[in-house]
Image (cartoon, rainbow, N blue to C red):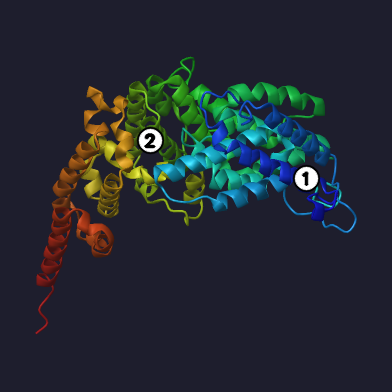
Amino acid sequence: MPSAAGGCDGNLETACTVLVSILMDFCQSSRICDPSENSDLVLGGYMGNRDIFSRLQEMAADLEQGPVVPHGHAWSRGHFLFRIFHSRLQALAGGWDMASRLQRQRELLMYKRILLGLPPSVLVGNPRAEQPAIPDCAEFFHLVNSELRNLCSRGGALTHDITVHFFRGLLQACLRSRDPTLTADQILTSCQTECPLVLTSALLWWQRLEPELLCRWRCFQSPLPRELQRLRDAWQFASSLLSPDTEYPDTVSPAPGPAWVSAAALHFAIQQAGKGSLKKGLERLGCPTEELLVVLFFFSLMGLLSTHLTPPAASCLTALDVCAEILEYLEKRKVPWLPLFQLTETDAGLGHLLFLLAPDQHVRLMPVAFYSLLSYFDEDALTRDDAFLPIAVDMYLKLLCLFVAGETGVLSSPASRTQELQGQGCPVGLITKARLFLLRSIPRCSRASFSNMAELLATRGDCDPEVSAALLSKQRAMQDTGLSQEPCLL
């Protein structure tokens, strides 16, 4: 039917676009907002809605067979689904208020469930004759990095369903490739720099993912691709390190490959094994790099914040103990960890990678993690570090801003009001402890610690006038002392 008459000019992709838009608009209507509806594919329990989705699945499968584009029409670059998602997300209101966040979360959950109902090759691209032989995952990676990352209830990993769907798509891409091993390695290598969350998610779910991967790879009659083997090695390293069967003092060396991959595997293994095996495991760790240790600490901080956001009390206590154990190990080996609390979106290298692994809300709540560990700090060592005071002040001022904005409400959950977490769970209690700690530390810090203090206080210094006055007073006193010690030349 011609477009002038409401048709799609015979373009199958255009028809799919219309169906997806109708389906999503229908699912977002007030008629299906009843939470009692049982729906695996955001179909709302309506027969007509399921019929639309079934037709969409058929048409999407037809598109997988190759481009069905009438003569004279150019093939559009990128998958139509991601273009629809992008345009709809742009139309949503931004902001950190609860209404905006819930609306965006609801929209994203609908996108995810639609993706799960379509062929997994949608996530990794579908190579065609006129396209490159290696699938292009850029659109899915962008969706993960910009949106799905913020749906992670536990920092550092996607849900099991979308993780498995991606790897099934990877295997389908390998089936279509002349060199399946090369295809798998190239896709997973691109994940290391462009979408590390896919790899950390695979490590979290590895015990459920590995049997399917090994079974389906046998059809290629070739060894497991190098990058899949690296994931397997990383999980085996973490399991061996924490296993009670590994006798002390036997050491376990990190797996080959990026150190952060081994750190992610170790973090998820600690979550499953419990903190009891952590101390002995760290003692058995052979030749750990600074990167591995710092990233492991970063993941433990994400775990601590996750327990505040989705708490049981026992998990909160365990996560805090794990953080403290790793922090003690870092300080014992004099590994610098303070830069973790200065991550920004514009960081390069490891900082940028870590930023891609953490949900935005977790990054915003880093001041909570920093001061939750207050009682475990080595104050003497920290006050000798010139970088410490600016970071501690920055974290304190950001903590105050979070409190004023109402974002520390996550600490007031029933789980964090248990007796053991009184000092950590109450936002006012945490702020009070942080404030007293700063006022106690300011006189002990070196002159170099105050070099950029005025600039730091210029933006948020009015949040706590007393702390600001103490900092500026100490800074002026040090400047006066420095002037009085200058030699008299006349």
> On the picture, is 125 further left or further right than 145?
right
Residue pictured at 31% horizontal, 25% vertical:
415
Which amino acid type corresponds to the residue marked 1 in the rendered image?
Ala
Residue 181 horizontal/vertical position (percent): 76, 37
Q: Secondary structure at mark 2?
A: helix
Q: Which callout, 2 or 1, points at the residue further toward the start of the chain? A: 1
Q: Within 10 angstroms of label 2, few (less than 14), some, or many (20 or more) residues?
A: many
Camera-side residue: 441 or 92?
A: 92
- Horizontal relation, residue 305 to residue 230: left or right: left
Residue 301 quadrant: top left
User: Can you see residue 194?
Assistant: no
Which quarter of the figure is the C terminus placed in? bottom left
Badge 1 marks a residue whose secondary structure is helix
Q: What is the distance, in whole Å, between disc 2 and disc 1 at their CAs? A: 44 Å
Pick whichever, 78 or 295, lies toward us: 78
Hey, which residue is sitting farthest front in the picture? 5
Q: What number is the disc on residue 352?
A: none
Is 30 drawn above or below residue 252 in the view shown? Answer: below
Q: Name the residue at the right extreme.
A: 71
Q: Is residue 285 visible?
A: yes
User: Percent from the top left, x then y, of residue 56?
Assistant: 75, 36
Q: Which mark is residue 305?
A: 2
Q: Is 171 on the left-hand or right-hand side of 196?
A: right
Question: Left of 289 or right of it: where is 433?
Answer: left
338 shown above or below 173: below
Residue that appears at 78% across and 50% down: 6
Q: Mark 1: few, some, or many residues within 10 Å (few <14, many ≥20)?
A: some
Q: Amino acid at mark 2?
A: Leu
In percent of width and height, residue 331 lies at 32, 39
Q: Nearer the viewer, residue 406 or 7?
A: 7
- Residue at 26% across / 35% down in the picture? 376
Q: Which mark is residue 15?
A: 1
